Image (cartoon, rainbow, N blue to C red):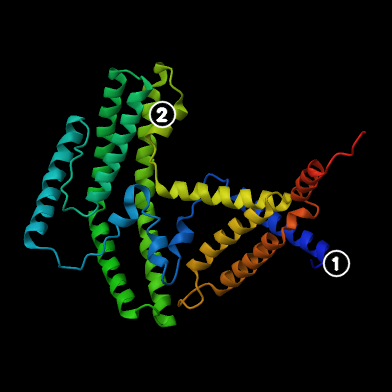
Amino acid sequence: MTRISTIAIAAIVLLRLLCGWHFFNEGVKKLDPSFSSAGFLRTAKGTFAPLFRSMIPGPYGAHIDLARPIEFGSRSAETQAAIDGWLADYGKRADQAAKDGKPLPHDIDPAVPGSGWVQNIAKGWDQGIQRLEQANLGDETIGKIRQLRDEKLGEVVYYVYGIYPDIEDLQHEEWRLHQLRESGGDTPAPFAQALIDQKDNENWLTMQPWIATVRQIEDQFIEAAQALAADADVEAGSIADALEEKSNLKLIDGAVTCVVLGAGVCVFLGFLTPVAGVIAAGFLLSLIMTQPPWATGADMTAFFNWSIELAAFLVLATVGAGRWAGLDGVILGVWRRSREPKPSTV
């Protein structure tokens, strides 16, 4: 068996501590409640970009439904007539409801741009109320929350009604963006990729104020529901947890945080180093796949940084770096001593 020099061992221990500390720090940053993988996943390039982008549907599918590419003038006369009819009718009913001091109507024609988002929100809130029914709030309280749901959904529909022209413009811009991507092929020219990235970012930023406004309405819905349930001896946190959206992106964010933080702690302490090193390397490989060097517009600096870190973690995993100045070494030493035959007392 090849012996490793003291200098090499010291270098391996130093590498282990630096890699572990780096991952630990990055994991701590991801404990911030505002952390989200959405922005990172959206910037993915290359062959796997559609896969990574599919992981960020947005709140209640906003980024999918609002940014649905539609060619200008491509709607049938019947569809356009249905949209125009709903807009005219809804405007009258909303005005009358405001005059009468009644909740805004919360129905929306499926042909209207943004209707899919509204339907997803309604479905999500209904699922939240179903979860609340298991919390023994009582039929009266649940009934009031359902009434509150209709009122707040009416505010969402009214907001979508007001920004309908903007949603329509965005969907036309998404169609132009789709055409740009199609014309560029798998490897568009650098200037074409820059134009695609710029237009994609503009469209993304266009949606964010709309999403933020609806989030505010949802927050008001949750706060009002908490107030209604205050007398039912139910914690406010459980009400919010039941009503908030259960999105895949939150699961991804949680998994990323656990992997980075957990791998960092284990590698730094030299505990289960081969396993932690392989997990960290696998995570870095997934990052590399978002910026492959052959993809136009890929972040080459990030690619090389991740590649170097991946190689470092593979080295740590291969040599079992935790056996030197790490918990793996302590555990291995205890295990070996326990296996040694005890001296005979005869």
Residue furthest out toward the right: 346
Give the residue type that dot 2 points to: Ile
With respect to residue 185, does 79 lie above or below? above
Picture quarter with the C terminus? top right
User: Which residue is at a point 29% across and 66% down the rendered structure image?
Assistant: 174
User: Which residue is at a point 26% across and 38% down the rendered structure image?
Assistant: 153
Give whichever of discs 1 and 2 has the lower sequence position: 1
Residue furthest out toward the front: 346
Report the side of 94 relative to 309 (left or right).
left
Q: Secondary structure at mark 2?
A: helix
Give the residue type that dot 1 points to: Ser
Query: Which of pointers 1 and 2 indicates the residue nearer the eye?
Result: 1
Tag 1 residue: 5
Tag 2 residue: 239
Q: Position of residue 136 (x, y in %)?
A: 36, 19
Q: Residues within 10 Å of mark 1 (few under 14, many from 20)?
A: few
Q: Residues within 10 Å of mark 2 (few under 14, many from 20)?
A: many
User: Which residue is at a point 27% across and 49% down the rendered structure image?
Assistant: 117
